[in-house]
Structure formats: structure tokens, C-alpha cells
Amino acid sequence: MAKKVVASLQTQAKDYAKVIQVVRSKKTGAYTFTENVVPNEKVQEFISKK
């Protein structure tokens, strides 16, 4: 699945970034990772969201 995302990013313009965030579950306290592909202009906006 990840190979398809990377391949599609290479064929498009290089204006996207893959953002990986660490999220802690309030219920169990375990850490999980979320991955999203966002435009470069919106990276800071995406990171500042909680």
C-alpha cells in the first residue's frame, strides 16, 4: 500500500509532504502513529491541530 502512495507522489508535482504524528490514546495511554500526505503549504497548519 505504501509503495502506491510513494509512486503516485513521484508522478505528481513535488508539493506534498508525508506527515507522521505520534498520538497518545486517552483510554489506554498507548502511543499510535498517524500518517497523512498534505500539501507543503498546509504542513504547519496540520501539525498545530490537536
Image (cartoon, helix red, strand yellow):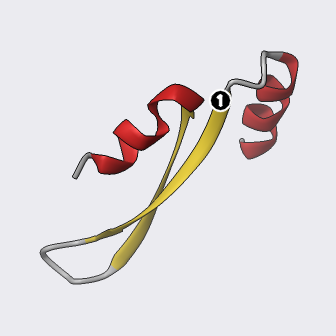
SS under mark 1: strand
Q: Front-most of 15 and 7?
A: 15
Query: In this rendering, would 42 be left or right of 19?
Result: left
Residue corresponding to mark 1: 16
Q: Position of residue 41 (x, y in %)?
A: 51, 27
Q: Front-most of 17 and 41?
A: 41
* Residue lying farthest to the left in this orientation: 27
Q: Can residue 37 be seen in this view?
A: yes
Against 35, residue 6 (above or below) is above
Q: How many labels does the image show?
A: 1
* Residue lying farthest to the bottom in this orientation: 29
Query: In this rendering, would 30 be left or right of 28?
Result: right
- Quadrant containing the N terminus is top right
Q: Which residue is drawn at 64% across and 38% down?
A: 17
The amino acid marked with disc number 1 is Tyr
Q: Where is residue 7 in the image (x, y as percent from the top left)?
A: 85, 30
Q: Which residue is drawn at 54% across and 48% down?
A: 19
Against 8, residue 31 (above or below) is below
Query: In this rendering, would 18 be left or right of 1?
Result: left
Q: Residue at x 58, y 31 (%)?
A: 40
Give the quarter of the image for residue 15.
top right
Against 38, residue 48 (above or below) is below
Q: Residue at x 62, y 44 (%)?
A: 18
* Residue lying farthest to the top in this orientation: 12
Query: In this rendering, would 36 be left or right of 31?
Result: right
Against 33, residue 24 (above or below) is below
Q: Can residue 39 be seen in this view?
A: no
Mark 1 neighbour density, 10 Å: few (under 14) some (14–19) many (20 or more): some
